[in-house]
Amino acid sequence: MSLLFAPLAVGHQRLHNRLWLPAMVTWLAEADGEVNRAIQDRYTRYARGGAGMIVLEAMGVRDVSSGPLLRISHDRYIPGLKALATAIHEHGRAAGPEGVGRTLVVPQIIDFLKIARRDPTRALARLESHYPGCATWDEDRLRATLTPREWRDYACGYRQQIEDLTVEEIEHLPGYFAAAAARAQEAGFDGVELHFTHAYTLASFLSATNQRTDAYGGTLENRLRLPLAVLRAAIAAVAPPFLVGLRLTGSDDVPGGTQVDEAAWFAVELARAGAAFVSVSRGGRFEDARRPPVGHAAYPYTGPSGERCMPGPREPFGCNLTLPATIRRALRAAGLDTPVVGAGRINHVEVAEAALQRGDCDVIGMARGLLADPDWPHKIAEGKPETVNYCRYTNVCEALDQRHLPVRCQLWMKRPEGGLHPPERR
């Protein structure tokens, strides 16, 4: 009678169970963004564990340097991505027992704006022409004199904002996403997830913090204009049964940011335009991030909104489920059956099953839980919850991501080989 292991239609595809691995950065790719053995080992390990869907870590749609992160911004990446998709499908098909079957895999595709490391000396040198002698001022005088934007760039490092983009730059973005979606289909993936959440470009257009005064800011319709164009361009670039879904911010969790009722309105409009699924997250904004150390770039998961995005051990299990529940109700009220993915400290089968039975969501997103134990699906399906290596939510994985180090789980680290990959099933 478990909904967790019941199949579910998602667009033209079918999930064999309702366990979903949301995108998590690994920092395991080559420096130029190419697939390598370490990336393949990580994701085939998840596939052997039996999750119904694997969402690959965010891949940039623009062909710019982004370090050891997977990329999908040029045709040269297609061969490596094709090998990765093939390997994941092969290992997913080999997964059993009954009820834990073929794994689907989609890359998350993203656009991000420019960001620089904090360098106060360089920042003051740039400000000298406007504020002679400012290099000798203390921070109280600097903060009182500089504009809010100048202060932020001095105190936290330069960060491009959506308000800096020209209309011409904005109008190029749907084409980048469409080309990335077409490459994903050519590589053999089952779909793509458009990254419309956290601190990145498309989420910033959707956010109530959007301060543009043209057709891309202000009203809900204007804030939705670019994400809607991206979705439509991606759908037009591919053919069924390929999925085009999205990850959406349910709440910005910063003053003046988007709240869940607005997010629900966005979800309905995007679903009407053809989104195959809506995966709900929250927070992870730059606005409340901690000031980075000198030589480091700002990181959007260090403030209160980041803590809500990746809730720690003090938060109750399933603490973010009110967001997908509200969005799902809005979709159903609009006559839409678009599947909704809920996530946020869901680690135990009782919490997951109850969320599905209540109708909070249709699918359970479990990132850190499956990082801790990729075999969670198999072990639960076999009725062996006592054998699961349960995530402790200490967020060691997030701290490694923040430092651009290979991401692993604290629970692996006592292994003799150093714990670079999840252990095999016990």
Image (cartoon, rainbow, N blue to C red):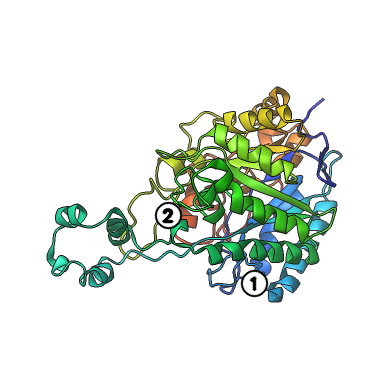
- Using the image as rendered, state which of residue 176 and residue 301 is in the foreground: 176
- Using the image as rendered, state which of residue 21 and residue 330 is in the foreground: 330
Q: Quadrant of residue 296?
A: bottom left
* Cβ–Cβ under 8 Å for marks 2 and 1: no
Q: Quadrant of residue 82?
A: bottom right
Q: Residue furthest top?
A: 358
Residue 157 left/right relative to 357: left
- Using the image as rendered, state which of residue 380 and residue 211 is in the foreground: 211
Label 1: which secondary element:
loop
Q: Position of residue 277 (x, y in %)?
A: 72, 43
Q: Position of residue 37 (x, y in %)?
A: 68, 68
Q: Residue furthest front?
A: 214
Q: Amino acid at mark 1?
A: Glu
Image height of 335 relative to 45, above or below: above
Q: Amino acid at mark 2?
A: Tyr
Residue for badge 2: 299
Residue for badge 1: 34
